[in-house]
Image (tube, grey):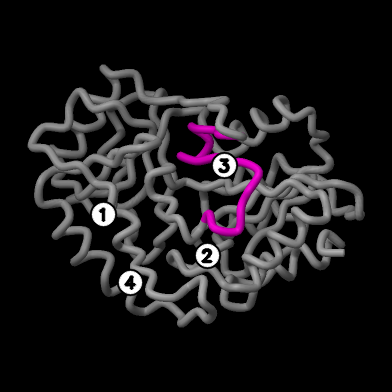
Amino acid sequence: MNSQSGTHSRAVFLDIDGTYADHGLVPDAHVEAVQLARGMGHKIFLCTGRPLAMIAGHILEPGFDGVVSGAGARVDIGGEVLRDTRFEQRLGDRVIEALDAHGAAYILEAPHEVHGRRGVDRRLRDILTPIFAAREAAHGKHSAAVDPTADILGPMQYGDDLRGVSFAKVSCFAADTALTTVIADLGPEVALVPSSLSSLGDTAGEIYVAGVHKAVGIRTVQEHLGLRREDIVAIGDSANDLEMLEYAGIGIAVEGGVPEVLAVADRTTARPAEHGVARALAELGLLG
């Protein structure tokens, strides 16, 4: 990493939750900054843990040059799929069996589908509604009438037995025991990061294929477009942003982010409510 900036063309990778948006609420200033930066010739990408199915239209509204989703498992640019990594079926079934054995409330995320056990929607609303209700109010037309719980439940498909489902990542929101215990017997092919909703504690988190993370997705974009690593900018706040901030030429952490991300960042920026993405792009000279 380095912290040097400049006005030549950059490629910017933006985390969504807690960075570009606040629980689905996107400040007008962020929409306008993305549009202005692209108009100046810079390439702007979403780089999120969400699958494509959970990226709402209002988030995509300003237009992006591509999307890295599933925390690096999927890469889409210009209608072309450059990467689509999923759990091998045998291993995926073992993950499901372990989660069910520990009473977990979880969803299986594939790029265009989200799967859950019957009844998980009620558990998720009970868990998430108080958290989202306490969010800071966001301002502007781009944030109007947004229900962040609907982003999760809207694309959901339900079943009594999820074994056999193809998926790239698991988001777990609650379990009877810590997730480290849940996945302890699954071996080195499975990895875990804490949930971006830190209040959920150690029984929540994201389970993914070991070795797959946001920096893997960024490298895929870099190689496809012939980008220089030093021209890559990444902005994020959560545990699954760690590798991308380490990899980027300029890694920017959002204030209040997890300590590990703040520790590797070259600089920091404000939270979404204070228009941190817009501020960061302006400070790098990407808005003119």
* Quarter of the image that includes the N terminus: top right
Q: To which residue does mark 4 refer?
A: 131
The amino acid on which the numbered mark 3 sits, given as a three-letter code, is Val
The amino acid on which the numbered mark 4 sits, given as a three-letter code, is Ile
In the image: residue 236, left or right of residue 112? right
Crowd band around label 1 with a 10 angstrom C-alpha radius: few (<14), some (14–19), many (20+): some
Precedes in sequence: disc 3 or disc 1: 3
Q: Does residue 56 show up?
A: yes
Q: To which residue does mark 3 refer?
A: 67
In the image: residue 280, left or right of residue 62? right
Residue found at x 57% / y 42% = 67
Q: To which residue does mark 2 refer?
A: 21
Residue 216 x %, y %: 60, 31
Q: State the CA–CA distance, disc 4 to disc 3.
A: 27 Å
User: Disc 2 on helix, strand or loop?
Assistant: loop
Give the extent of the magenta segment: 60-77
Q: State the CA–CA distance, disc 3 to disc 2.
A: 15 Å
The amino acid on which the numbered mark 2 sits, given as a three-letter code, is Ala
User: Disc 3 on helix, strand or loop?
Assistant: strand
State if disc 2 and disc 1 touch (CB < 8 Å).
Answer: no
Mark whose residue sits in front, 3 or 2 = 3
* Quarter of the image that includes the C terminus: bottom right
The amino acid on which the numbered mark 1 sits, given as a three-letter code, is Leu
